[in-house]
Image (tube, rainbow, N blue to C red):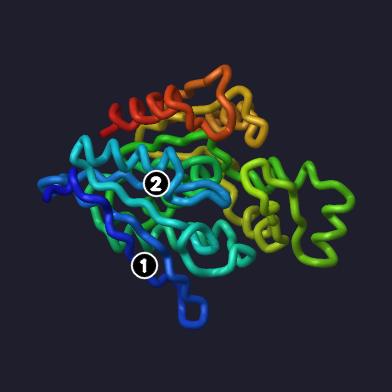
Amino acid sequence: MTATQTTPELRTLSVGPAGDERAIAVLHRPAADGGPTQLVWLGGYRSDMTGTKAVETDRLAAELGLACLRFDYSGHGQSGGAFRDGTISRWVEESLAVIDAHPAERLILIGSSMGGWIALRVLQEIHKRGTGPKVAGMVLIAPAPDFTSELIEPALTDDERRQLSERGYFEEKSDYSPEPNIFTQALLDDGRRNRVMTGMIETKCPVHILQGMRDEDVPYRHAMTLIEFLPADDVVLTLIRDGDHRLSRPQDIERLQAAIRAMA
């Protein structure tokens, strides 16, 4: 059977030094006929690689004969590791390790919510290396770069600050899960060290941002702020007036796939 007909096989990749290894769950679809382009799905905070947008991205890859790489960060989905140990640095490390283990000439990074932040950090690290794959494009869905310092910390209540001081974390009701969101002091501290909206971001590739204007988690003005740090690049911002944070409706998936097609 060809790559366009098979379902990717679940595999695990060990990431991290001795004593801090995490078993990262990976689904990899090879390109038909050994093509050079690989889509890389980078999910959001507490999401996993079996969500609607991730699955539809893989389906498009199969249709176009492209490689597609999906995986769960540690503490997410089918991967090992404790969620409370998660930081942006750890999830970037895991993302790079998975990409390195599945080499391709051209990458299209597709980041959803926090995955948009991870995508920008991964791109920066790839550029620092000076070798390896070329990032040929980025599609960012409701991107949340620097969300810990720009969105979470300014809105902390006195009680949440007290919990951070006393317990090292605070909990917040989730609209997407019966389990609460957990934000640790380590995540907030590490987030400051990984900020990207501190100067011009040179992506050296086209960027397409899809953003709902009814997004209550990442306000659309955050996407507009991000654009200010992408002045030298081919950037397209699509504002979806009735779109929420998930952007998983059929019409939203069509927009996502059209953006990927244009880059692939």
Q: Secondary structure at mark 1?
A: strand
Q: Is residue 224 above or below residue 10?
A: above
Question: Can you tell which quarter of the image residue 234 is in?
Answer: top left
Q: Residue furthest bottom?
A: 18
Residue drawn at (50%, 42%) of the image? 116
Q: What amino acid type is highlighted by mark number 2?
A: Trp
Q: Residue furthest top?
A: 241
- The residue indicated by pointer 2 is 41
Residue drawn at (40%, 43%) of the image? 54
- Where does the image place residue 98, in percent across and percent down from the top left? 36, 60
Residue 172's disc is none
User: Position of 264 compared to 15: left or right?
Assistant: left
- The residue indicated by pointer 1 is 12
- Where does the image place residue 80, in percent across and percent down from the top left? 49, 68
Badges 2 and 1: C-beta atoms under 8 Å apart? Answer: no
Of badges 2 and 1, nearer the viewer stands 1
Residue 25 visible, this orientation: yes
